[in-house]
Amino acid sequence: MKRSIALFVALGMICGLTLAVAPSARAAKPLVVKIAGMKPEGEPETIGMHQFGKYLEELSQGKYKVQVFPNSQLGKEDAYIASTRKGVIQMCATGTQTSALHPAMAMLETPMLYDDLDHARRAMAGKTFELINEGFTEKSGLRTLNAFPLGFRHFYTKKPIKSINDLKGLRMRVPNIPLYTNFAKECGISGQPMPFAEVPGALDQGVIDGGDSPLADIVSLKMYEITPEITLTGHILVIHSLYINDRFYQSLPAEDKKWFDEAARRSADDVWQLVKEGDLKARETITAGGGRITEPTSEFHDYMVEAGKRSWKLFYDTVPNAQAILDSAASYRSK
């Protein structure tokens, strides 16, 4: 009898311990993944980061929680890229800034390379993306998880650009990046490198005649109110990616890696669709706000294409497989 009572007591204690431990096990704190970016809320890059977090949390059933730090909250691009490489944070979003670590990354934004978003999407989902990233992880300690667009860059100016002669000699703000300044020179533009924050003041003072940006930026900053002439040249597609510290990635269990990869793929798909739809809405907003949108003539377009090709020589000196990348991108054109 005593033995039976002791057994019941022991079983009760075990059950009690099980009930006490099980809830805490289920309520284990999620592993936090920090991701930094430069764009504010509502922009494609930031939306992509949030979507990645949403998908990762769903796929992992709450094992991971993603903290998004947009709008350069963790420092400028160089700073948060360095933090990701060191493992201070796990991930970041950026574009051709990584070309300082691997010159081929600049070719993500090769001038006049893509006919449209669908062409670029096929290339980024295929061999072109692989060729650009060849050797990147070994050099940088970062792994590229995806590629997504922020949009094609178009000219915004005070006066209309109706011909090649209208373009030549224009003083246009350009990012202080060799890729951009070189392309401007090949177009006959007087490129004026300056931070984007200085553009409104420079326009007011007559220092520049205009600049170029994706339609989303032109709308969010209402550039069409200052420079109402928007010329849809689509000369450079701005492409960003999600990067992850490779040591952190390699430390993940095989199943977890699949979650990260799948979350990155899904979030990129969302942004490609978002930008495609957003560009159409942006045109409506610009027109409704008093802006005027001009489609380049075929002669003007051909001139831009040739200028773009001349600018590619910048890559031949720094990227060993540059021609293979260009040929690969061309192979994804619609037949």
Image (cartoon, helix red, strand yellow):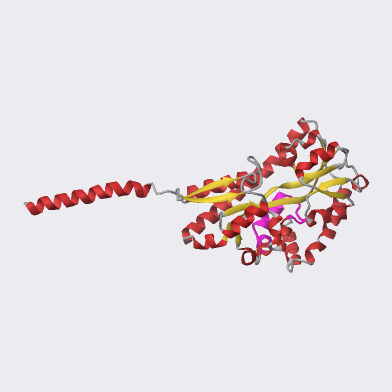
Residue found 62% across the figure and 64% down from its top = 137
Residue 85 position, x and y percent, is 60, 59
Q: Quadrant of residue 98?
A: bottom right
Question: In the rendered view, does 4 fall on the left or right side of 317?
Answer: left
Image vertical order of residue 329 relative to residue 225, above or below = below
Residue found 53% across the figure and 60% down from its top = 248
Q: Give the range drawn in magenta.
A: 109-130
Residue found 79% across the figure and 57% down from its top = 178
Image vertical order of residue 254 relative to residue 175, above or below = below
Question: In the rendered view, does 175 fall on the left or right side of 24?
Answer: right
Question: In the rendered view, does 324 fall on the left or right side of 268?
Answer: right
Q: Can residue 155 be found in the magenta stretch? A: no
Instruction: Compare residues 278 and 103 and report the one nearer the observer.
Output: 103
Residue found at the very far right of the displayed protein:
165
Instruction: Compare residues 14 and 281 and report the one nearer the observer.
Output: 14
Question: In the rendered view, does 89 fall on the left or right side of 224?
Answer: left
Residue found at the very far bottom of the displayed protein:
320
- Count the marks: how many? 0
| Quadrant containing the C terminus in the rendered view | bottom right
Residue found 87% across the figure and 54% down from its top = 185
Is there any visible trace of residue 241 in the rendered image? no
Residue found at the very far left of the displayed protein:
1
Instruction: Compare residues 107 and 233 and report the one nearer the observer.
Output: 107
Is there any visible trace of residue 130 in the rendered image? yes
Residue 332 position, x and y percent, is 71, 58
Residue 59 position, x and y percent, is 48, 50
Q: Can residue 124 be found in the magenta stretch? A: yes
Instruction: Compare residues 136 and 290 and report the one nearer the observer.
Output: 136
